[in-house]
Image (cartoon, rainbow, N blue to C red):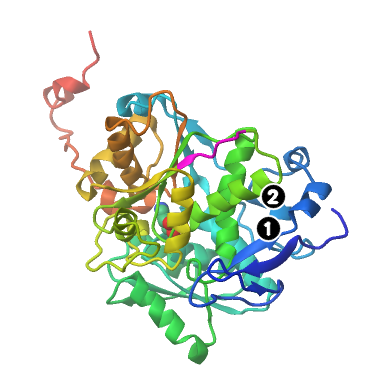
Amino acid sequence: MSAVNCYVTHLESPIDGTRFAPGLIHGTHLGRPLVVEYDLPGIRAATSPEDWRTRQPGMWRYSELLPLPFDQEVVSLGETATPLLACPRLGKTLGVPRLVIKDESLLPTGSFKSRGMSVAVSMARYLGLKRLAAPTAGNAGGALAAYCARAGLEAFVFMPEDTPVVNRLETVLYGAKAFLVNGLIHECGALVRENAAEFQWFDMSTLREPYRLEGKKTMGLELADQRDWTLPDVILYPTGGGTGLVGMAKAFTELRNLCWLRNETMPRFYACQSSGCTPLVNAWNAGTRHAETVNNAATRASGLRVPGAVGDFMILDAVRQSNGAVIAGDEARIDYQMRRACALEGVPLCPETAVCLEVLEGLVRNGAVGDHEDVLVWNTGAAQKYVECMEHPMQQIDKHKPLVDQLEVASRPRK
Ligand SMILES: *Cc1c(COP(=O)(O)O)cnc(C)c1O
């Protein structure tokens, strides 16, 4: 490592370009996110992709492009590099034989929320914060709770009453102070913000502090690394708050500016939402820069139940620049897509990613995605966390009767 302790130059507002100094506690500016900027020429002089390859696999390998000073201890639960799984059987069914799923279910706490929280909680501890709070509709609460436990910090989590049972239980299990609220996630977020001064907690909501984005950025860095610094043609991403998509776009831009990418063209991003909650789809179709908060948001894909995203314009800009689109998948088809993918490939697909497969079917049907293209879908979480979506009827066997009389023809070996 060089004498430099960190390559962050400043934080910047994408709204009006105002700059902020690194090493201080930051939230939003004008109610909108701040982004971290790096000394890319300095990084280029100090390290290289070959150098990164000599380190342990996983998100912290890219430390020069992360905000934590090198002399600070990382808050980690062992974030592995997640596998790129070729899915030819599922791909053939969908009309894209070169389909690959990047399976984030292997990360600690069973979802990619760990990437954001590992960096954000590391930064919070470094900056001297002791009490962290966040709203969650799904996996963010468990991840915040686990990383706070790991760091010895206090976590406060506010969630809607219909949050999936595993997400509720894990948050308490990891020792957070957890609360059920008779409202949606943006109303839980408002509770966190309005009471921050009184309770002295720091707001860790998606894109309301700058470092979860840097953690999610490692999705893009790791993907490029695993593909030997090339990128796929098409990326489908289940989009709620949008941190992952904005993070990926930031990763690709930084890698391109470092001249470490081999391709000329960037992937087309398809941001996928459930038909039960479509604020970004509405804004995309209307051609507006910001999204209006939707009412009555309802989807089994809890990570996508985000009625209003503070980083809406960053998501829409990234998708537009990539020549992609923001598209809704039919809520009623989530169970079918989830089951088919799990059964065809053994990948524990979450309902959020099931929405992406539904969108992908439509894109292939209307010719927007061709059968020759490299298509990458993010499996953002583990199916096992969604017991509500896993329930399925099973035949009951009577041990007192012969099995041959009970098993249907389909269970017999083929002649
Ligand atoms: C949070 C979450 C999402 C949405 O991620 P954003 O980056 O906030 O858009 C998608 N899938 C799962 C499983 C999630 O937990």
**Which range is magenta?**
263-268
Q: Is label 2 in a helix, a strand or a loop?
A: helix
Q: Nearer the viewer, residue 61 or 388?
A: 61
Residue at mark 1: C-beta within 8 A of ligand 1: no
**At label 1, which amino acid type do we have?**
Leu
Q: Position of residue 270 (x, y in %)?
A: 40, 44
Label 1 environment density (alpha carbons within 10 Å; few <14, some 14–19, many ≥20): many
| Magenta-colored stretch includes residue 175 | no
Left or right of 174: which side holds 123?
A: right
Ligand 1 shows up in the quarter that is: bottom left
Q: Nearer the viewer, residue 142 or 267?
A: 267
Q: Position of residue 240 (x, y in %)?
A: 39, 58
Q: Position of residue 199 (x, y in %)?
A: 50, 88
Left or right of 29: which side holds 161?
A: left
Count up the numbered dots. Answer: 2
**In the image, what residue occupies the spot 44% across and 80% down?**
192
- Seen from this angle, which residue lies furthest bottom? 198
**At label 2, which amino acid type do we have?**
Tyr
- Seen from this angle, which residue lies furthest top? 415
Which residue has dot 2 on it?
62
Disc number for residue 401: none
* Figure check: 32 above or below 228: below
Which residue has dot 1 on it?
66
Residue 34 sits in which quadrant?
Answer: bottom right
Residue 164 sits in which quadrant?
Answer: bottom left
Q: Is label 1 in a helix, a strand or a loop?
A: loop
